[in-house]
Amino acid sequence: MKTLKRIWDLALMMVVVWVMMIALIVTIDKMVVPLRILAGEGTTQTIIEALIKLMISAFMAMSWLLIWVRMVQKYIEKVDRGLRSGS
Amino acid sequence: MIPIALITSFTITLTLTPLVMKLMRKLGIVGIDVHKLSRPEIPEMCGLSMLIGLVTSSIILLSIQFNPKILTFTLTSILAAIIGIIDDIFTLKAKVKTALTILCFTPIAIMSMIYPNHIILGRPRAPLIGGFRLTIVYWMLIPFAIAVPANAVNMMDTYNGVMSGGCAMMSASLLASSIILGQWDEATMSAIVLGISSAFYYYNKYPAKAFAGDTGSLMLGAAIGSIAVLGRMEVIGITVLMPFIMNAFHSLRSIGGLLERGEISERPVKVVGEYIEANLNPKAPKTLANLMLRKGRATELELIKSYHALCAISSIMGIITALLMLVRI
């Protein structure tokens, strides 16, 4: 029971991060990859389009990481607040 | 092949570890268990027995039937273990060690060129969509696919049995996932890792009689990373490694990158009698132990149980990820 209490928030965080990771992969595959941004079929257009898609995907992945970091910060703030009010 | 891999790797490691322990003690390669009041001296670098267990089982399997994937997995693990041995003996700088582990990807890169039909890179399987194709980006990311797990597992080797027990759970999850996906080569490799890590756990569990050293931890991390890459199970790999990644990522972020032990002014935890407490100093690295102990102090055994519970959850999530790979939306 003690163990469960200690890991509960972190385990929940891990599950949320995992669900978000799967959602991120599905979103990139279903929404970013099929995007048609530029007209035309030339090599330059294809490269530019691929770069834009890469940037969108990288931005989404960075956002996922940032949310993970924020969740840990919130957890620390919440636990520390609890400690202060308890003492 | 799976039972052979499991039994040989387990038996060899279980038999060899006491001998390696004696040898390390004789050579004076010992470390202090800092989380115990008596601060006992424990033989270090005993992960050597896991390396021998892994290599011998792989040789037996390769002599039955040659398999480029098993050979690649073995070479990657050996390379990581060599870096670990060097670090255990000479203590490399943190940045040098990390840079060297990036090189552990070399066997996979070379073997994928020699056996392009067996080792397919850049097409990771993914849950709900089956998989996706990455070309240039994959080659940019792939060196980290071995370096990240190797270093993350290495950073988690701080309490008795956490690293070996965690790796045993992760490899069991990878074994189940490989069977679900019908990937028998990866199942065999996972069985080897499960065999060596669970046998070593017997000696490494609380109170530890043997420490794996960087030899064992870097090798286990690289072995798990290579299974994920070779089996196109990168997403499962990230999932099962989540507690390890969380530990490494947040502690490195909180101290501002790779630093030497001496450069870190505050320890993540404090030992007070038989209890371990979180160091609440803002400069203390936010390791998983620091985060868990903020909720209250714990004995070492209680803390180890918490680590194992997190690893068990991530291992179950790994199996669910594999099941989701069979579903298409």
Image (cartoon, coloured by chain):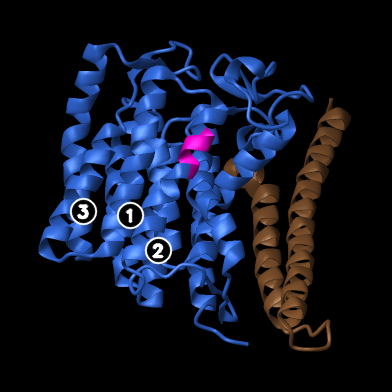
Chain colours: A brown, B blue
Say if residue B141 shows up in the picture: yes
Q: Earlier in the sequence, mark 2 or mark 1?
A: 1
Question: Mark 2, chain letter?
Answer: B
The three-letter code of the residue at mark 1 reads Phe
User: Residue drawn at (59%, 21%), measured in percent from left and top?
Assistant: B260
Residue at the disc numbered 2: B230
**SS label for mark 1:** helix
Residues packed near mark 3 inside 10 Å, few (<14), some (14 to 19) or many (20 plus): many
Q: Nearer the viewer, residue B239 or B75?
A: B75
User: Residue drawn at (58%, 86%), measured in percent from left and top?
Assistant: B328
- Residue B192 shown left or right of residue B144 in the figure: left
Residue B101 in magenta stretch: yes
Q: Which of marks 2 and 3 is nearer the N terminus?
A: 3
Q: Are marks 2 and 1 on the same chain?
A: yes
Boundaries of the magenta span: B98-102
Question: Mark 1, chain letter?
Answer: B
The three-letter code of the residue at mark 3 reads Ser
Q: Are marks 3 and 1 on the same chain?
A: yes
Residue at the disc numbered 3: B58
Residue at the disc numbered 1: B73
Residues packed near mark 2 inside 10 Å, few (<14), some (14 to 19) or many (20 plus): many
- Residue B46 shown left or right of residue B277 in the figure: left
Q: Which of marks 3 and 1 is nearer the N terminus?
A: 3
The three-letter code of the residue at mark 2 reads Leu
Q: Which of B314 and B274 is in front in this view?
A: B314
Is there a contact, CB below 8 Å, between mark 3 and mark 1?
yes
Question: Mark 3, chain letter?
Answer: B
